[in-house]
Amino acid sequence: SSVVLLYSHFERYFYAVHEEAVAYLNASGIVSETIPENLRLLHSNLVVTGLGETSWERRAPGLARFVRSEAWLWTPGATGVMISSRLLEWMTSPDPKALIRLYNYWGISDIFTAITRRRHTRAALYLLVEELVDRRHAIAHGDANATATRVDVQRYASTVIRFCERADRQLARRLAHLTGGASPW
């Protein structure tokens, strides 16, 4: 149960930190073209996909919704409000590949490389995050062979803390760079 609880906190961290990041961007009045294109595409994805799945005759309300919520992202010099929940709808699990993808949206190409100096440290961090996620899934899905010792839980906890502290610093630096302001945290 410790693994499942730790994993839940780890997963919730990404929602919380991205809610804070989007709130910081929204409060900064950042202009659209300063926001990384991948992040703007991700934010607009839900509305655009919905438009594509709607018959031509019924697209008018969707187009109006797009203009209200998304057009500013594609208009140079415009400002608006991003919705943080749109940025994580795709993420089903905070496995290493998903984390790399997530931070890439913010312009951090490989979060594991960004937060580690040495290749072996990076590999160990990556593998421990992957192991935590895999172990949690095995336990949660009833695999009777999936167990975790006290030592395993301690390793996972220190890995989560190390990853989150370092990723926090990277994202804060990135946000300060994007906004031209002070670090948000």
Image (cartoon, grey):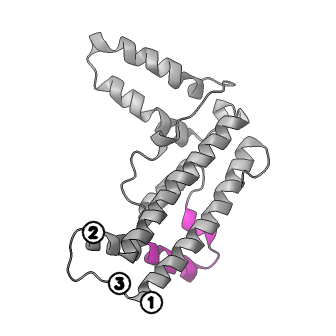
In this picture, is 95 found above or below 62? below
Q: Position of residue 69 (x, y in %)?
A: 51, 24
The image quarter in which residue 55 lies: top left
* Residue 169 percent location from the top left of the image: 68, 62
Residue visible at 57% across and 80% down? 121
| Type of amino acid at the residue the image marks with label 3 | Ala
Label 2 vs 3, first from the N-terminus: 2
Q: Which residue is mark 2?
A: 140
> Is residue 114 visible in the rendered structure shown here?
no
Callout 3: helix, strand or loop?
Answer: loop
Residue 36 visible at all: yes
The kind of residue tagged 2 is Ala
The residue wearing badge 1 is: 151
Rounded to the nearest angstrom, the CA distance separating label 1 from label 2 is 20 Å
* Magenta-tinted stretch: 110-129
- Circle 1 packing at 10 Å, graded few (<14), some (14-19), many (20+), is few
In the foreground, 114 or 130: 130
Instruction: Examine the structure image and report whether residue 6 is included in the region drawn in magenta.
Output: no
